[in-house]
Amino acid sequence: MKTKLTWVQRYHRFIKRQKKRTLRHVIIGLVVTFLFIQLFDGQSMAEDVQVENDDQPIFTASMVGDLMFGRHVQEVVERYGYDHLFRFVAPYFEASDYVTGNFEQAVVLREDFQEADKFIHLKISDLNALEALKKHNFTVVNLANNHAMDFLEGGMEDTVHAFRQVGLDFVGAGLNKEEAAQIAYHEINGITVATLGFTDVYTREFPASDYRPGVLTADPTQFIELIHEADQNADLVMVHIHWGLEYDSYIHARQKDFAKAMVEAGADVIIGHHPHVLLSVDIYKDSIIFYSLGNFVFDQGWTRTRESAIAQLKLYEDGQARVELIPTLITEATPKPLLDTYSFYHRERIFRQLTKETTGDWTLEDGKLVFQFKSPLPTPPKAEESNEQWMENDLYYY
């Protein structure tokens, strides 16, 4: 006759049986966890990023979204340094002739400044971030945004002086309205590039005036005239615009109207920012519009604010243009391209967001989103045949 076990005895028997399976379960769990992290956090096993330049463009520009080096980003910098933030993306910038992004904070070198009447104030307190941008081949950055004036006139004065001390160009802000409206011109590979910056997001204390530091606002009567001026004096016109709503993944009618007006005035490339998430890319009259490139170096932690992209514009001698968007994921303020096999989940999410409202054609090539269109550069005239060639090719009758 079998003895009936108590519940305590049954429990101990169950534990003994499970002990034999514990090691196997632990191993399986570790393998599953590792694969999950690789698939869904987008981290490649390889540290090095290789950039191929087989297509030989005559001009390559790299564009990114919001660059913010304060708050928790400083904690990363204090541990690892600024080069750590750019270690995965530096090859793209080194291979570029022109690099730009949106500088989303003030540079405050003194401590006695009044804060603007707003909830969030962003700042850095030294020149190291600017020197890091210059080291990594940044050509010019935009200051026309809703944080450049977080510490009002004094903060803007420090910011302007800091950029000038480092020798890094900026647009969209200045010590007065005339300075804020200045167009940055750069001669690169025989191409004149003009850069401008405007913001449609600001408080009443932010706009520059004739006698007051500040940012340049996106008043159509103002930006149409300035973009037209740039178009008359440059081969390629790049326009930064801070617009839209934070964390909103849809493009609003105001943004579309502004974009079309900018293109009609002469903008070849429109670089949008402020939403902190990616928005769709579109082409209008052979001009490329990045409605939002999201964050690039930032400390926001939820998924959509970590999904980013590097936009590369390549121009060719045959009159063609190509834009490649390299999907990127931000981890601990550090952007990393998602070109490896394990990163398909975030890569597909990024591509869906970048094409959600796109009206033109696009393709996927080697893990990148690609747009092709006519180059904004004037087509060089064909070389005329010499008199000798002309005489050889034609028959004369006398």
Image (cartoon, rainbow, N blue to C red):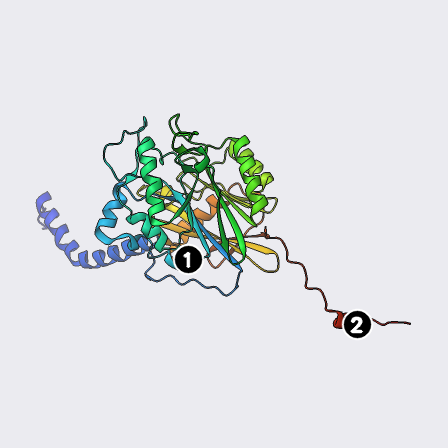
Q: Residue at x 42, y 30 (%)?
A: 207
Name, please, the residue furthest toward the front: 211
**253 shown above or below 133:** above
| Residue identified by numbered label 2 | 391
The spot of residue 345 in percent (x, y) is 40, 51
Which residue is more in the foreground, 22 or 100?
A: 100
Label 1 or label 2, whichever lies nearer to me, is 2
Helix, strand or loop at label 2? It is helix
Q: Does any portion of residue 182 appear in the rendered image?
A: yes
**103 shown above or below 62:** above
Helix, strand or loop at label 1? It is helix
The spot of residue 266 in percent (x, y) is 58, 42
Which residue is more in the foreground, 293 or 117?
A: 117
Which residue is more in the foreground, 19 or 39?
A: 39
| Residue identified by numbered label 1 | 92
Q: Earlier in the sequence, mark 1 or mark 2?
A: 1
Which residue is more in the foreground, 149 or 62?
A: 149
What is the crowding at mark 1: few (fewer than 14 residues within 10 Å), some, or many (at least 20)? many
Q: Residue at x 19, y 57 (%)?
A: 21
Q: CA distance from mark 1 to mark 2?
A: 50 Å
